[in-house]
Amino acid sequence: MANTRSAEKSIRQTRTRTRRNRVKKSRIRSLRKEALAALSSGDAAAAQKAYDKFASVADKAAKTKTLHKNTASRLKSRMAARLAAASKKK
């Protein structure tokens, strides 16, 4: 339990930031799943579009420190490699 006004404010700020970060991370997971689904469907154009959207959101999350920059980079790199492999097969 907070004893001071500043501690109460800190709790409010943490709660707000946690909600905001949770939404961003959920969005990243959803877009990642959409991109993987587009890849597995075999539609290269849809997969590229889904990857672009995913990469943009991941970069924005890294910029605001919701995700570590290396984590965002790793996720994008793995997705790009899958996209390249899928387009090479055809």
Image (cartoon, grey):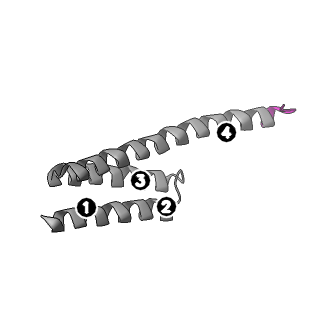
Mark 3 or 4: the one toward you: 3
Q: Residue furthest left?
A: 90
Location of mark 3 (residue): 58
Quadrant where the C terminus sits is bottom left
Magenta highlight: main SS: loop
Location of mark 2 (residue): 71
Residue 75 horizontal/vertical position (percent): 41, 60
Three-letter code, disc 4: Thr
Few, some or many residues within 10 Å of mark 3 (<14, 14–19, 20+): many
Tags 3 and 2 touching, CB below 8 Å? no
Quadrant where the N terminus sits is top right
Which of the two discs, 3 and 4, labels the residue nearer the N terminus?
4
Which of 81 and 71 lies nearest the eye of the viewer?
A: 81
Image-quadrant location for residue 74? bottom left
**Separation of residues labelled 3 and 4 (CA atoms):** 22 Å
Tags 4 and 2 touching, CB below 8 Å? no
**Separation of residues labelled 4 and 2 (CA atoms):** 22 Å
Three-letter code, disc 2: Thr
Tags 3 and 4 touching, CB below 8 Å? no
Q: Residue at x 26, y 49 (%)?
A: 50
SS at mark 2? helix
Mark 4 or 1: the one toward you: 1
Which of the two discs, 1 and 2, labels the residue nearer the N terminus?
2
Residues drawn in magenta: 1-6
Magenta-span inclusion, residue 60: no
